[in-house]
Image (spheres, rainbow, N blue to C red):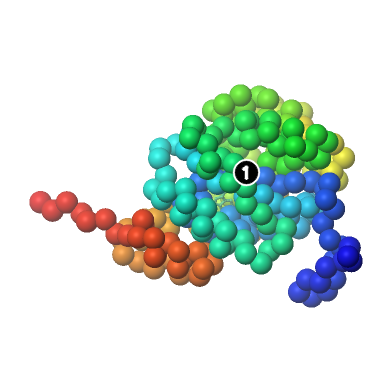
Amino acid sequence: MSTLQRVAGGVTPAPAPNGPLGIFGGTFDPIHYGHLRTAFELLQRLSLAEVRFIPVGTPAHRGNTLAPASVRLAMVQAAIAGQLEFTVDEREIRKATPSYTIDTLEELRVEFPSRPLCLCVGMDAFLGLSGWHRWSELLNFAHLVVAHRPGWQAPTDGLLGTLLASRGTVHAEQLHASPAGRIFIHAVTQLEISSTEVRSLLDAGRDPRYLMPDSVRQILLKSGWYARKEKASG
Ligand code: ATP
């Protein structure tokens, strides 16, 4: 089989099977173009071999998600269809207990003993890092790739500022050279979309068209989970 695959606009080398694996976790309630464009830009900029979307089952860091895991999973599957390097990993939604990122990273490290793992998070998520379960061990298992989100600045002092000073790098090649341990901040196209905003829009009876692929919008509307709630009168 050829190691080259045809993509729109030319022929590019097929992803290296042992190249860096991007990990993009989220509640995806629902998935939107902010997630997809960010993942795509990181895939390209960092020459990742794959970006794995890992929908959270029972979130450990926030209240219950609105839509059940099956609906959120179906939306992620629809969203990534046709993008060969995008995959979905169902391990967290199969768990009955809250999902901790560190557990997922530990499992992936067993599966991929020496492959670079790149945990991709938005700047908002990075700023809350010290609240994550066993957060100080994360860099033992993966690199951290932080996507700039609208309105969020990288910390220059405090715990995260110090961590950035010692582990930060501006050289994407360093993410290929070791399996874990570096932090790379990358400015992505600023798409001011959040799942919260999509949900409020739906709750206001408005249409989320063009904020997400239409295949996702169709599942979302059909599921009924995001339908406008009756407001209590009086
Ligand atoms: P919510 O509004 O419900 O908190 P969200 O839109 O932030 O959801 P999540 O599923 O919680 O989406 O986020 C998964 C990851 O995607 C996080 O690391 C988050 O920072 C990142 N992310 C979400 N929206 C964007 C965006 N518009 N641009 C860049 N990164 C984003």
Tell me where residue 166 appears, x and y as whole percent. Answer: 77, 28
In front: 189, or 76?
76
Q: Name the residue under label 1.
A: 121
Q: Residue at x 73, y 42 (%)?
A: 118
Q: Quadrant of the N terminus?
A: bottom right
> Which element type, helix, strand or loop, lies under badge 1?
strand
Q: Which residue is drawn at 67% across and 45% down?
A: 23
Compared with 152, 96 (above or below) is above
- Left or right of 182, for residue 233: left
Amino acid beneath label 1: Val
- Is residue 214 at least partly visible in the picture? yes
In front: 181, or 20?
20
Tell me where residue 109 appears, x and y as whole percent. Answer: 74, 34
Q: Does the residue labelled 1 lie within 8 Å of ligand 1?
A: yes
Looking at the image, which residue sits at the far left? 234
10 Å neighbourhood of mark 1: few (<14), some, or many (≥20)? many
Looking at the image, which residue sits at the far right? 2
Looking at the image, which residue sits at the far bottom? 9
- Left or right of 9, for residue 227: left
In front: 55, or 188?
55
- Is residue 182 at least partly visible in the picture? no
Rendering quarter of residue 64: top left
Tell me where residue 122 appears, x and y as whole percent. Answer: 60, 45
Tell me where residue 13 appears, x and y as whole percent. Answer: 87, 62
